[in-house]
Amino acid sequence: MKKYCRICFLIYLIAGLFRCESEREFKNIFDPDNANPADWKPENVVIQQLSVERLLITWEHPNPLVQGYVIDRKISDGNWEINFAIIEDRDQKDCQDTIYTLGSEQSYRVTALAGDSYSDFTKATIVPTIAEPKNFSARQVGVFAVQLQWRDMSDGEEGFSISRKVGAADWTGAYKILAANTTHWVDSSVTLNTDVQYRIQPYLGDFTGEPAETTIETEFPAVQNFSAGSISDSSLMLTWSAHSYFDVSQYRVLRSENGGDYTEIASADTCYFIDSSIVKTTEYRYRIESVAGSNTSDQSVVKTASWVGPVEQLWSQVNTGNGGIRAMEIASDNSFVAAAFRSGSSSGMSTAGAIKLWDSATGSQLMTGYAKLPNGISVADDQSFVAVADDYFLQVWNIISAAKQWEVTNQEYKSVSINPDADKLVAADGNNHIQLYDLSDGTAIWDKDMGSSVNYVKFSPAGDVILFNGSTNGMLDLTGNVLWNSINTYQYFNSDGTMISTGGYFSIDDEFILGSGTIDVADASSGASYWSVNTGEAAGVYDATTGTEIWSVSNESNPQWIGDCERIVTVHNEAELVFRDAETGDFIDSNDLSSTVTSISLLDISHNGERICIGSGAYVYMYGYASYWKVTTEG
């Protein structure tokens, strides 16, 4: 029995050895008898078109024993060119080739080598073409002119062919032929109030690449941002944005009195008109038409205006014991005014300050909160929160509940701004940092060390960038990246170089920045640089993309945009308001308020441009006051 068992065990062992040998997987790709060519062929073979003349073939191969590659090629319906390219470097996994015929098929087979062993090949095919232009668009720039723009995605084309279709007519092929690398063209022969279609195709010789199409309906629209308001006891001022069409030569002003018919009262070649022939008891309605040759645009929206005086005080609040006013802001819906007061005694010793909210209609107090030494204030556009930057803390208050939402302490905060979506807050502290917070709970999103002092931060009207200034000036995106800086504007310095104030406000379309104060850098003969400053303060408008100056004027401060940013108001001689054209800086009118206020330290304009809040009172006094004014008509 034992002998029988031993025999069975030997038979089982021998059978197992034969079974393991027959099932063993041979991975030695140098062994042509045992290696499976399908197991180690190249993977992910991709053909990319680099230009109208070149192709790039790439592949992958994870097997470390591969020594090189063989590439075969086939052009259109021709025969395979065996060993078209032999690559002996195993680490090279790409090959370039020439395009033989655009629009015809080119195929490639990639095989791996290991000694005398060849893997199976992997095949890829491409039909070379000329890439389609991207972002093809049409924009009307004149009464009879449409500008086409696109992104050139090809390299090596001979040019571009543009076809056009007007209304229900047939396509006009090769309507315009443009040179290579062109990215825009103006069609100056369109027809008003017509659908026009365009097709663009790159070409090389007789071959045309992939087309792109766009359609536009031509029109002559009305001017935008039309406003009307009184500027004196006998005149109303009309302003509007320059028409986007380059061939507009003038504007017609149409007026209706007390609901009567519209008649043309003037034509202007500028974007404003002062109607000096008004009667206080009459209601006026205005419309604007743009003119280009014999063509007239659609009429603007109707603006109704009656004389009410350019500046009329509605209420004033004196805040005894709360010190001089340091910051204020009108709510976006004109429902209330928020202000921060910084207390002090005649010797300059600090006491407790305050945050106050007043009802815009009556001046009655809606809310009060604690502040110590505030520097800045910001109100959310939805009137949900008010934030204050203080020498000792950063606070956010819930306006509805009049309760403190959150607080960050142990920093000297200089400025604060809430974004339009009312979900983020940006602050500048006295330690050279700009910080972005979650508005709801104070969670820090990022903290950026600017390397030098930052005294002012402000979200743009769109909320997608942040303006800052201090030792340097510039703009951040919402991740904290600097878009531009070191543009030395917006600052006002004493003759000894110490800074007095900063400021900077975006226009409603984010295109321009309003600033106060100017500085220059003068080089001494020794090569050292010194700050120098003009006499008195200055106000100016700057390009928001680059920070470059558009215009500036001396001896005026605290500039503010009015309404649609067609006008600017500044302070002159401490108590005089000066109104200027925002585009040119030209003087429009002024109002001396010295009989009502001793001095103007702060200004804020409501979002619709119809209200202005004036702050007065210095840091060393135990009082400050805010007054609320009507600055233009409700129309």
Image: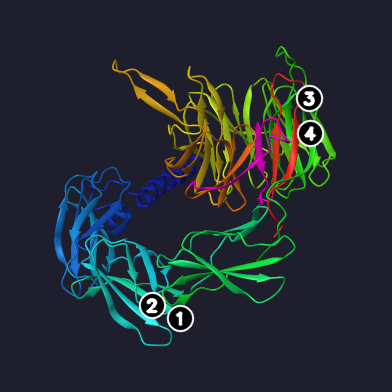
Q: Does residue 394 sit above or below 21 in this rendering?
A: above
Spatial distance from mark 3 to mark 2, Cα to Cα? Answer: 66 Å
The disc label shown at residue 322, or none: 3
Determine contact: label 2, label 4, CB under 8 Å: no
Label 4, on which residue?
356
Spatial distance from mark 2 to mark 1, Cα to Cα? Answer: 8 Å
The figure's colour scheme reads: rainbow
Residue count near mark 4 (Cα–Cα under 10 Å), binned few <14, some 14–19, many ≥20: many
253 relative position to 367: left or right: left
Spatial distance from mark 4 to mark 1, Cα to Cα? Answer: 57 Å
Residue drawn at x 39%, y 74% as measured from the top left: 144
Q: Amino acid at mark 4?
A: Lys
Label 2, on which residue?
190
Depth check, mark 3 against mark 4: the one in front is 3
Depth check, mark 3 against mark 1: the one in front is 3
Q: Is residue 453 visible?
A: yes
Task: Magenta stretch: give its range.
Answer: 585-610
> Which of disc 4 and disc 3 is earlier in sequence?
3
Q: Of helix, strand and loop, which one carries label 2?
A: loop
> Which of disc 2 and disc 3 is earlier in sequence?
2
Determine contact: label 3, label 4, CB under 8 Å: yes
387 relative position to 41: left or right: right
Spatial distance from mark 3 to mark 1, Cα to Cα? Answer: 65 Å
Looking at the image, which is closer to me, 418 or 192? 192
Looking at the image, which is closer to me, 503 or 472? 503
Spatial distance from mark 2 to mark 4, Cα to Cα? Answer: 59 Å
